[in-house]
Image (cartoon, rainbow, N blue to C red):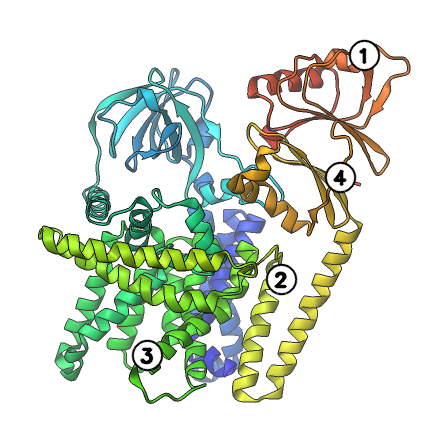
Amino acid sequence: MAAQLWHKAPFVRLLIATAVGIVLQWNVQLPLSVLLLCFAVCFLFAMLYSFTGIRKRYQLSAVNGAVLCLLFVAGGCLLVWQQDIRNNRHWIGHDYKAGNFFTVKLEEPLVEKANSYKALASFETLNDSSSGAKPVKGAVILYFKKDSLPPTLQYGSRILFNRPLQEIKSAGNPGSFDYKTYCLFNGITHQVYLSGDDYVLLPGTDKRIFAEAVFACREWVVGVMKKYIPGEKEQGLAEALLIGYKDDLDKNLVQAYSNTGVVHIIAISGLHLGLIYWLLMLLTKPLKRNKKLVAVRLLLVIASLWLFSILAGAQPSVLRSAVMFSLIAAGELALRRTNFFNTLAFSALVLLCTNPFWLWDVGFQLSYTAVLSIVLFFGPVYNWFHLTNKAVDFFWKLTAVTISAQVLTIPISVYHFHQMPLLFLFTNFVAVPLSSLVVLGEILLCALFFFAPAAQVIGTVLHYLILWMNGYIEQLNSVPFAVWNGLSVNVVQTLLLLIFVVAICYWLMEKQRRFAWAALSSFAVFMLIRTVSFSEAERQQKLVVYNVPKHTAIDVINGRNYVFLGDTSLLYDDFARNFHLQPSRILHRVSAQKTDADTKSFLLNGKQVVVMNETMPLVTANPKLTVDVLILSKNPKLYISKLLDAFAIKQIIIDGSVPAWKAALWKRDCDSLRIPCYNVGEDGAFVMNW
């Protein structure tokens, strides 16, 4: 079957080649001249091949196929080079100097945060005292102080400021989310915090009609949800289900949905568009009888998909799904004999040509693997049972879809989220149809908003449906074995898992021995890599000083155990612990160990580590106490020169709890005294191996 797919679905080959080029360019960063040369040579060969005789073409067919794949590899590299904002000659980073004035335009409405308002803006001009105004490109995240916000600041507003730009950085904690790369994929490289006196609001606005309509539509939908659906928790989930608006979502509820394997229903993407697509195909089925109305049916389906996408806020995730299902609809309705895998690969190729960085997007990966998994495995799973009762058969179809969708998505989910929901079948069996019903009800609510009595009835029904669904999910989340946490697999292991899952499924379906051997081989290599990683973890000894703003967080790792030294508040803050600390512990495969050791001074593999977080008297000593690692924490009143009178210090670490101004002073003193100094607030987490 694989060989047949390889020949009947050429876009699968081209998609793989393009993806290889995207990954290659991002990791190697080849120069533009090399990329253009490779692309030109491959393109020239392809053109010459098309003009050769039939006999010569047959002889060179294999070479032509390889060159064509190389052409798309080079194309993928060029896409990455072009999309990377740092390669734009007008990028702000090439010309920025401290003291420059900037003109920026707000690209979205303000979003309220705990202590500020946040908005994405694009650079328009850089104003230099010597060369004047110069057009520049790039995006910046603006944070506005709450008590200094003018009421007229909105989408399309233009402001002038000269505050120093801050480069966006990741926390740098081991295994944590790479926020810097995420922003770079979206063309965002800087951020700045502005108070009322730091900027000037320029007259007039610069708005795009389509974007303004999308924002207005989004705001209107949120208003309808809040007006007719009672309960803040239910409103927040309703907004997320229909348009992906997550600002009102309850964090604990999101965690419950994640633990039980149904967080995908909150992230509006393939599931929602798949539901709309199914409904549209069902409603337009009468048009199928007349061949002359095929084009009308196709137009209605595609137009409705894109109308819903705009209603949902035209987010990248939903637009990607709209492209995918539009091409699937075109293939199914207009080209009756098209290969579904070819259509699916073509849609993915179109999206990657639009933005090659979507290859790393979790939503992109899960959407395509879920659709592919359903196409491959729904039939075999559904055929497990032959049911005559239509109602029972309908529920079995839902169960079969849920099971088949998980086959390929579980390895991807484990790689990204380091957990595997064990009750996904029970939660999806209820949550998927119920959330689908809620989405359809919300669409009906928006359609009848003008008729208040009907809207109130629909809103009340939706409230109880969401309330019951939330209660069901939270109740299952409380089951001790609801989720298998702490799973750590790398890219190679994830690919091996995918090969194992596909091979074992096809062995069960086709009864061919080669699939069994492929499954066993991939699983054996997977277990070998896993065994080696566990063996290395047993021998590890590390000191990890985390970059947690305003907090002290230190892990002393010995083998598969760790001792936490730091602020006890982090032990009770689920979000901070899961975001900053837990990824590192999963990566290092460690679990907590209770200890009564002194948290101020301890030995790690013969090395003296001292944590200093308060002012203390320093006495000149002779001989001096040798300190291999001195961790400065909180805000003690001390001077580096005085420390050197009392200790022989080999390395100083400044943790995230130290105020930025004091960390800068200590770093400057260390540099002048030639003492190695590491500031986790600037450079990310400090990890020392012994």
**Which numbered marker is on residue 492?**
2
Residue where numbered disc 3 is placed: 394
**Of 650 and 111, the residue lying toward us:** 111
Q: Look at label 3 and name its amino acid.
A: Phe
Mark 4 vs mark 2, foreground winner is 4
Q: Earlier in the sequence, mark 1 or mark 3?
A: 3
User: Of marks 2 and 1, which one's residue comes earlier in the chain?
Assistant: 2
What amino acid does circle 4 point to? Thr
Q: Identify the residue under disc 4.
A: 595
Q: CA distance from mark 4 to mark 1?
A: 32 Å
Q: Say which amino acid is labelled 1.
A: Asp
**Which quarter of the figure has residue 532?**
bottom right
**Amino acid at the residue labelled 2:** Val
Where is 134 relative to 34, above or below?
A: above
Q: Separation of disc 4 and disc 2 at Cα? A: 36 Å
Disc 1: which residue: 645
- Alpha-carbon distance for marks 2 and 1? 51 Å
